[in-house]
Image (cartoon, rainbow, N blue to C red):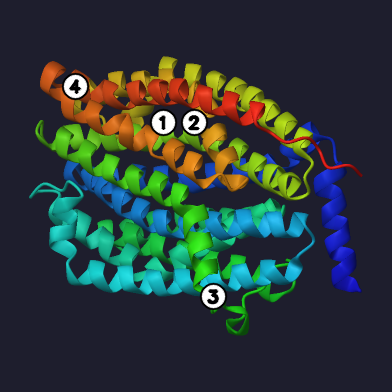
């Protein structure tokens, strides 16, 4: 009876709360989580940059590695999460438990495999991700700790997304925020207090990620969720694995292409030396703060759209999308303007090196200038994925860091040198938003009518 009451209460909240209020409630903790995560990534960049320019460049190399881990975790997390939310919208709790357990244990296995392969082939992996000879020692030291924590990191991404799709983003925020604050406290202690250098940054990140994942796991073990992790619930039906993977494919594409894009950006910048790699690493981390806010707001849309789509309340899905785009675009445009005008001050806080500043300041201005338009693209991609339109979601997910960015990062530096590196990502952001527009027009036109109550 208690579980039925919990299910009915969640159903009522997700299907009857006014859409604008629900989006604000769902997005607030995800924005906080994204900001904390990216602030501690910035803290890593800040503290590591004090070691030297080559060490600063190593942060960008390891960022590409972490994107690979995110790709796997988000694939399983978004794939299972959107299905779980639709099952809960249809009041099928048993299927939700099976999907959650299947995703969790599969992700744990994949995390172990990635860790073993990465540690075995560490040096070629670092070169593949864009390391130079001088950056390699720093990147390898940092990456060892990240790979050691890979299994916990991957399942952490899965649990975070399942919690969000259940409409319990506040629980996810607790785990991510605690991990982020812990990381920021451990960084200076390990790097400077214990004189561990870049090893300290890697160890701090690994510990904080592991602690964050354990906190998220406790939410499931203490019965705070409708989903459960139990080996007895793991599916033996290959079709369900394929369904999770296919639904999560857009996330895999999005994050996997982010890793490839970071690798290609590092390699393009490496032609101009370690200062260029360091500058673009700093710019990527800073500009992602704005993108993180947009992503966090968009993530508030996902459980609302998937739950109501499962409940066949399609008008609420439409309202949720348009409110989220308007709200997210307004917020990100304001933050983008601040980034453009304060670019000089911001970049100097990380590395007051003339060569880094020469590239970093105009690059940050260019990237921030394009951030305001990306919310429409992000929300459209998230909407398609959250309601199970996997093919359209996969196409959209491949745009920003793949279809649009890769040709630009190959072509523009050949034509315009360093300026081509600076403008490749902003141009890709604008193109992605333009291409996403007909997708949302088609989605709205083909939306079914609400079910009759």
Q: Are marks 2 and 1 in contact (CB under 8 Å)?
A: yes
Element type where label 3 sits in the image: loop
Give the vertical position of 268 relative to 359 (above or below): below
Residue 64 x, y percent position in the rendering: 30, 49
* Image quadrant in which you'd find residue 315: top right
Closest to the camera, between mark 4 and mark 3, is: 3
Residue at position x 80%, y 61% from top? 91
Q: Could you tell whether 439 is left or right of 67 in the image?
A: right
Q: Toward the viewer: 196 or 342? A: 342
- Inter-mark Cα distance, 1 to 4: 20 Å
- Inter-mark Cα distance, 4 to 3: 47 Å
Q: In which quarter of the image is the N terminus?
A: bottom right
Q: Name the residue under label 2.
A: 290
Q: Name the residue under label 3.
A: 237
- Inter-mark Cα distance, 3 to 1: 42 Å
Q: Could you tell whether 394 is left or right of 278 in the image?
A: right
Q: Could you tell whether 199 is left or right of 302 in the image?
A: left
Q: Name the residue under label 1.
A: 287
């Amino acid at each position: 009876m208690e579980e039925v009451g919990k299910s009915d209460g969640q159903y009522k909240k997700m299907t009857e709360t006014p859409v604008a209020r629900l989006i604000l409630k769902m997005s607030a903790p995800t924005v906080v989580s994204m900001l904390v995560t990216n602030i501690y990534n910035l803290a890593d960049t800040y503290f590591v940059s004090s070691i030297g320019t080559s060490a600063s460049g190593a942060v960008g190399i390891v960022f590409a590695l972490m994107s690979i881990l995110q790709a796997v975790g988000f694939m399983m997390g978004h794939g299972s999460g959107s299905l779980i939310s639709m099952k809960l919208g249809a009041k099928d709790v048993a299927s939700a438990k099976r999907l959650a357990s299947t995703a969790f244990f599969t992700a744990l296995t994949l995390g172990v495999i990635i860790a073993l392969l990465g540690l075995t082939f560490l040096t070629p992996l670092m070169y593949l991700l864009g390391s130079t000879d001088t950056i390699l020692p720093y990147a390898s030291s940092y990456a060892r700790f990240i790979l050691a924590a890979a299994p916990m990191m991957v399942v952490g991404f899965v649990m975070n997304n399942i919690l969000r799709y259940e409409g319990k983003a506040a629980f996810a925020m607790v785990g991510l925020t605690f991990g982020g604050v812990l990381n920021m406290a451990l960084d200076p202690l390990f790097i400077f207090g214990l004189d561990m250098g870049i090893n300290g940054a890697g160890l701090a990140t690994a510990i904080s990620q592991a602690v964050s994942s354990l906190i998220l796991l406790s939410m499931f073990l203490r019965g705070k969720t409708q989903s459960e992790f139990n080996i007895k619930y793991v599916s033996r039906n290959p079709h369900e694995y394929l369904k999770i993977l296919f639904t999560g494919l857009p996330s895999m594409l999005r994050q996997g292409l982010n890793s490839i894009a970071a690798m290609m950006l590092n390699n393009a910048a490496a032609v101009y030396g370690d200062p260029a790699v360091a500058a673009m690493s700093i710019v990527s981390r800073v500009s992602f703060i704005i993108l993180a806010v947009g992503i966090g707001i968009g993530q508030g849309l996902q459980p609302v759209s998937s739950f109501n789509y499962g409940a066949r309340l399609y008008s609420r899905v439409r309202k949720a999308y348009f409110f989220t785009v308007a709200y997210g675009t307004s917020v990100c445009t304001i933050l983008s303007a601040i980034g453009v005008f304060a670019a000089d001050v911001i970049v100097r806080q990380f590395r007051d090196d003339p060569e880094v500043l020469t590239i970093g300041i105009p690059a940050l201005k260019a990237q921030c200038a394009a951030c305001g338009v990306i919310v429409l693209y992000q929300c459209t991609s998230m909407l398609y994925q959250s309601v199970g339109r996997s093919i359209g979601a996969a196409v959209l997910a491949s745009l920003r860091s793949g279809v649009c960015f890769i040709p630009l990062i190959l072509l523009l530096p050949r034509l315009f040198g360093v300026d081509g590196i600076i403008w490749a990502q902003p141009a890709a952001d604008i193109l992605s938003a333009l291409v996403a527009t007909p997708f949302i027009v088609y989605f709205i036109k083909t939306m079914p009518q609400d079910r009759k109550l």
